[in-house]
């Protein structure tokens, strides 16, 4: 649910059973692929995936009040209008190029209330979020347990809108007032990825990156641990656990959020 923290000289709550917040199903830019050796030919993999993320943190966008978010993945699914996530990697020799993209739109009805006056009104909220990450990978260690050094940038864009009955603010009942905010920024980051063979079919994979450092977010970092199952030479099944933290603050826009949960995807190699 969303819980209103503060808005200038008033305090209120915007609540719903499963309100708008798939925000930052954060793109890592580098976990789709892990070939065990460098090859002189180009190799490609595309991987549609789902990250079943929970969310916990604070967000404030433009004239929208500062809001506390604490949602399970099942809450988010209930209010999802549309979503798409995919990762792509191209590799030749020691070098690789990584791409990760996502678009999400969620909306729901809500109830808005002001503490201390016992008044509750109807509200509507909608959130659209886009994120694209691009990176270059260099294979620092080859062999059965390859290690890649990764550097890239992550573009983030958030659009949030709310329509709230004006009676909450002393206006005429039945009319609505719109509150909205949008923001976009770029976070540079560096990371490392290692792939460990388990047997002929299974591999373990670990990934961590960090960035921001005030050039975008104050700080952003993520970690991932997973398994890759080679179903065939051209198809892999990927699964694991992923955590990401973003702390962005720019005047009237604040996003301080932690996402974590299981992910799963199917990779197609060619």
Image (cartoon, rainbow, N blue to C red):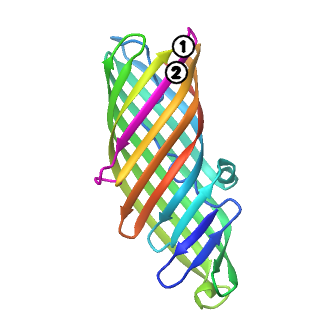
Q: Is residue 155 left or right of residue 53?
A: left
Q: Is residue 268 visible?
A: yes
Structural distance between the alpha carbons of marks 2 and 1: 7 Å
Label 2 close to label 1 by CB (< 8 Å): yes
Above or below residue 156? Residue 139 is above
- 92 in the magenta segment: no
Residue 3, x across and y down, in percent: 60, 68
The disc at residue 198 is: 1
Residues 205 and 109: in front is: 205
Residue at figure coordinates x 52%, y 74% from the top left: 179
Q: Is residue 35 left or right of residue 41?
A: right
The disc at residue 25 is: none
Q: Is residue 30 visible?
A: no
Residue 229, x across and y down, in percent: 58, 18
The disc at residue 204 is: 2
Mark 1 crowd level (few <14, some 14–19, many ≥20, 10 Å Cα):
few
Which structural element holds mark 1? Answer: loop
- 207 in the magenta segment: yes
């Amino acid at each position: 649910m969303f819980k209103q923290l503060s808005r200038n000289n008033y305090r209120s709550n915007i609540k719903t059973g499963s309100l708008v917040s798939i925000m930052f199903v954060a793109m890592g830019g580098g976990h789709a692929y892990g070939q065990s050796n460098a090859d002189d030919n180009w190799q490609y993999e595309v991987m549609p995936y789902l990250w079943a993320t929970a969310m916990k943190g604070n967000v404030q966008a433009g004239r929208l009040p500062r809001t506390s978010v604490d949602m399970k993945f099942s809450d988010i699914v209930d209010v999802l209008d549309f979503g798409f996530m995919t990762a792509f990697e191209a590799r030749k020799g020691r070098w690789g190029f990584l791409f990760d993209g996502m678009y999400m739109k969620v909306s729901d009805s809500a109830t808005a209330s002001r503490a201390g006056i016992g008044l509750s009104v109807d509200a509507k909220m909608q959130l659209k979020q886009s994120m694209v990450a691009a990176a270059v990978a260099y294979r620092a260690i080859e062999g059965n347990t390859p290690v890649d050094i990764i550097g890239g940038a992550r573009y983030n864009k958030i659009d949030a809108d709310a329509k709230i009955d004006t009676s909450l603010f002393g206006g005429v009942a039945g009319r609505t007032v719109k509150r909205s905010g949008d923001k976009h920024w770029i976070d540079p980051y560096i990371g490392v990825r290692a792939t460990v063979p388990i047997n002929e079919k299974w591999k373990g994979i670990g990934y961590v990156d960090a960035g921001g450092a005030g050039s975008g977010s104050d700080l952003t970092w993520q970690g991932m641990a997973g398994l890759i199952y080679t179903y065939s030479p051209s198809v892999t099944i990927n699964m694991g656990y992923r955590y990401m933290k973003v702390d962005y603050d720019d005047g009237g826009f604040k996003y301080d959020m932690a996402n974590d949960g299981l992910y799963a995807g199917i990779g197609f190699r060619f």
